[in-house]
Image: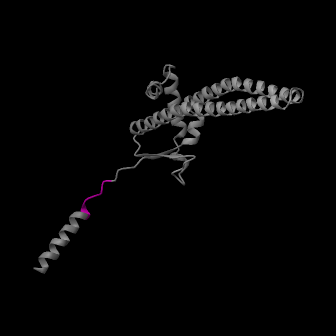
Amino acid sequence: MKKALVIIALSILVVSCGKTAEVKEVKTAYVDTSVLMKEYTEAKDLEAKYKGQAEEKGRQLQAEIARFKQDAASFQSQAQANGQAWAQQRGAELQKREQQLGYAQQALSQQLQQESGVEMDSLVSGVKKFIKEYGKKNGYSYIYGTGDAASILYAEEKYDITKDIIKALNDKYKSEPKTDKPAVKEEEAAKK
């Protein structure tokens, strides 16, 4: 009986050793996400768009601030001539106006951050989807991300496909018609 068990165990061992293990090559690569976002044309266009809006809206606010500063300077010179009651009333008006200008600056900043955040989220989502499709199309098992929020501590440069992804994304972006993103319009409509 013991001999039978030993023979069975040996035959199982021989059979299992006789099979060659199928080894599938795992194709991996990584993308430097900080470089990607700096060199991706759509991201650059988005940044330029909001920088331009900030400058345009900021100029309007700066004109208001300049008028306020002129009024404050004239207040200083007129305060003694017009008396203490006038100075207190006019000073309170100026303080209220200064506070309103501060609120306007904050509101402008928050509005631009919110609008750009919605579009940036849409852009990042699109890039992730593109990289996923790129990986499937090119036979990658894994594509890792490095950059500001690095998840890879070391990788050989031969696995860096950042330039390939940037070129493919830029080519895709150039070939698309230039219109507002529908996702952004839908999200803005949902907020109203």
**Magenta segment, prevailing SS (helix, strand or loop):** loop
Along the line of sight, the residue nearer the viewer: 61 or 54 = 61
Q: Farthest residue toward the bottom?
A: 2
Where residue 60 appears, x then y in whole percent?
Answer: 69, 23
The question of residue 80 being in magenta is answered with no
- Residue 5, above or below 173: below
- Residue at the image position 54 percent from the left and 30 percent from the top: 115
- Residue 98, above or below 25: above
Along the line of sight, the residue nearer the viewer: 122 or 98 = 98
- For residue 83, which quarter of the picture? top right
Along the line of sight, the residue nearer the viewer: 18 or 54 = 54
Where residue 148 appears, x then y in whole percent?
Answer: 57, 46
Along the line of sight, the residue nearer the viewer: 165 or 157 = 165
- For residue 77, which quarter of the picture? top right
The question of residue 21 being in magenta is answered with yes
Magenta-tinted stretch: 17-22
Q: How many marks?
A: 0
- Residue 34, above or below 65: below
Is 51 left or right of 118, judged from the image as shown? right
- Residue at the image position 83 percent from the left and 28 percent from the top: 75
Is 144 left or right of 44, judged from the image as shown? left
Where residue 138 appears, x then y in whole percent?
Answer: 41, 38
The colour style of the image is: one colour
- Residue at the image position 22 percent from the left and 67 percent from the top: 14
Q: Looking at the figure, which quarter contains the N terminus? A: bottom left
Where residue 88 appears, x then y in whole percent?
Answer: 79, 32
